Amino acid sequence: MHETHETHEMPETELPTELSTSASVEAAYPSEISRCLDALARRLPVLIECEKELSPYLYKAIRDRLKPSGVRCIYLDGRPAADAPPGSPQGAIAVMLGQLRDVVRGPTGERIVVLPHLDLLTTGSGGLTGEAREVIPLLYENPEILWLGFKDPSFPLPEVISGLFPHHESILGVPRDRLVHLVTRREARKLGRTFEPFALYKHVSGVNAVRLRRLLGSLTGEDYPTNGAAVFAQLRAGTLGPTLTVPEIDLHRDIGGYSRVKERLQREILDVLAAKDRLTDSAAIGRLEQLLPRGMIFWGPPGTGKTLFAKGMATALGAAVTVVSGPELKSRWVGESEERIRQVFVRARQSAPAIIIFDELDSFAAARGTYGGSGVEHSMVNQLLTEMDGFRSDELVFVVGTTNFVESVDPALLRPGRFEFHLQVPYPDADDRREVLEIYDRRLELQLSPRALEFAVKRTGDPLESAGGGDGVRYSGDHLRALCRQIARNRLRESTSAPTEVLDVERALEAYLERPTLTPHEERVVATHEAGHALCAMHCPHAPAIDRISIRGDAGGALGFVQYADPAHRYVVTQKQLLDSICVLFGGREAELLLCDDLSAGSAHDLDRATRIARSLVEELGMGGDALGRRSFSAGHGPHQAPVADATRQLIDAEVRTILERERLRARGILEAERASLEALRDLVLEKKVIEREAFAHLGGK
């Protein structure tokens, strides 16, 4: 190859004036054709995997090179002979079977028998076809015959047949270094003021030479356009399969918030690809391609936009996207699930640049030993890995797996070289929620007032579920979208063009809630409980600030709640913070005892959380008393857990009781000292049902 072929620009004078389809195939695949000829010369049967439209031209190239040596080729394509007698088999498959019988049992001699449709003869769903059962013994019957078979990548072959061919050649797309031989001068003029093969290759890497010539020959438009975007759009439209689309989702304009997620995608994927596009040396490009992760895991809670980020990445790359549901890939038929995965990869590679998104990856790629399925999941994982290992380094095809539980994914998939790039997409924080709401405000023309926007940001910081322990489910991007759609529906019903205010947001939020109806006595107990939490938090220096107190039952599973501001320090938790958390948890119980002279069953959850924090302080964090020393008592699990003597266990339990009682008394002391503030806060909550920080800031504390 000429040295200028290694750079971005190719002088038009070095391109061919005309190019036939046969010549383009020979120019595109000289190494592949030579390897096949070498194998045939050594009497090795050859199997070529390529698309149907390519196989006749590859056969012609091989046949033309064999002619000087006098080797005869017999082409069994299922076309009946002109002199076929009446009553001969009808249909291409039946004719091919008859042709195969005749050639296997006919005269011997040095010849190559060509099977251009080997896949059609032998492939069917649910196992071997009836034709395959006849074809298999015929292929093995005459050892004097040298076979040259062709199969389409979209069809599998039974192992007993593929094993007959010692030499396999797989052809998909066009090698990057051969692309310059497949573009004529007229076509190059349509692509821009200068012809840059690498820029073109990004759009056609999965297109075979025959189809590429057809696409290039169909280009329309002016010569030497200043902007070749319209021409590349024509090429993109011609390379898309029926199940792939190119999304139009701008990472920054259409996805609100998540600056860290966007920055990581930009820095580690998009910037690397942009750097590759700027390079002019093929060796440097090859080195950079080794840095790109082919497999990526996007993980996080449901509804946070994992698939949306993958589509945003695809938009930035101009890549086609196919979204595959993990559960839908499974089939009860043997081998069909693996075949579906293979088909997905074939279509994506033909339409490169492309991104395959496996939604709910853990549904079939769960860690081994943790899944109770039929066993097909392991075969699906193996097929997925096989397909990923088959990528060429210059192919722009990426695989993104989304999951809510990354810890449940098979470790074999998480190794370097497989799904090595992990991207967490968490619940949106306040800044993220604000940006998401602003996007929907513009898109749905909600006209959110500044106060309504800030109210929506705060209210969507509430948990959606708090029953059953833990922090519960929080508002995700999907929830925010649903909220904005509800506001838009309300505005449409009321035919209003006025700005959306706080009450409108509150009304939209209420549409999803079934609030309990409390008696006055129940309301008083709940208000007392939440006021106790809030007042203790206001007087504990290491507890987070309070944004809101509610007894309207507007957090799923909770009659009332205290909403805290996002902590200033999210990743470092100190001993004093944990102790203050225990004190605040006791605040609700102690307030009930102090003002109601009774204790409700609803405080059980607080006691459970306080106990777990205290036990963690002692058993895991080494923050117990001096008698226990500075060690962890929970290292290891199951048979590997360090044994703990009965006497030590008694010391641990005693220390947990000491911490709990000390923090309970601290909460009691705060509430007794601030009883007037506690009663005032309770009464304010009873009156307003929901109060913001400004309404109780005068009661003191931090």
Image (tube, rainbow, N blue to C red):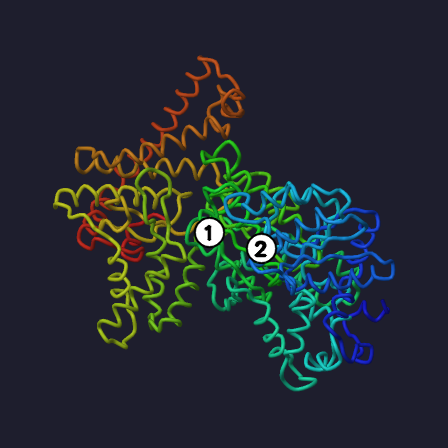
Q: Residue at 52% across / 36% down in the picture?
A: 367
Disc 1, SS? strand
Where is residue 426? Give x, y as percent.
Answer: 47, 51
Q: Amino acid at mark 1?
A: Ser
Q: Amino acid at mark 2?
A: Ile
Where is residue 412? Give x, y as percent.
Answer: 60, 39
Identity of the residue furthest to the front in this view: 86
In the foreground, 495 or 64: 64
Identity of the residue furthest to the bottom in this view: 222
Q: Residue at 32% across / 41% down in the picture?
A: 536
* Residue 411 falls left or right of residue 390: left
Whether residue 618 is situated above or below residue 245 in the rendered picture: above
To which quarter of the image does residue 494 belong? Answer: bottom left
Identity of the residue furthest to the left in this view: 520
Say the numbered circle drawn on residue 89.
Answer: none
Residue that numbered label 2 is attached to: 93
Where is residue 197? Give x, y as percent.
Answer: 74, 71
Whether residue 541 is situated above or below residue 650 in the rendered picture: below
Which one is in front in this view, the residue at disc 1 or the one at disc 2?
A: 2
Reading the chain from its start, which is encountered first: label 1 or label 2? 2
In the foreground, 96 or 522: 96
Q: Residue at 30% across / 58% down in the picture?
A: 694
Q: Label 2 crowding class (10 Å Cα cut-off): few <14, some 14-19, many 20+?
A: some
In the foreground, 699 or 129: 129
Say the numbered circle drawn on residue 325.
Answer: 1
Q: Are marks 1 and 2 in contact (CB under 8 Å)?
A: no
| Separation of residues labelled 1 and 2 (CA atoms) | 35 Å
Whether residue 361 is situated above or below residue 374 in the rendered picture: below
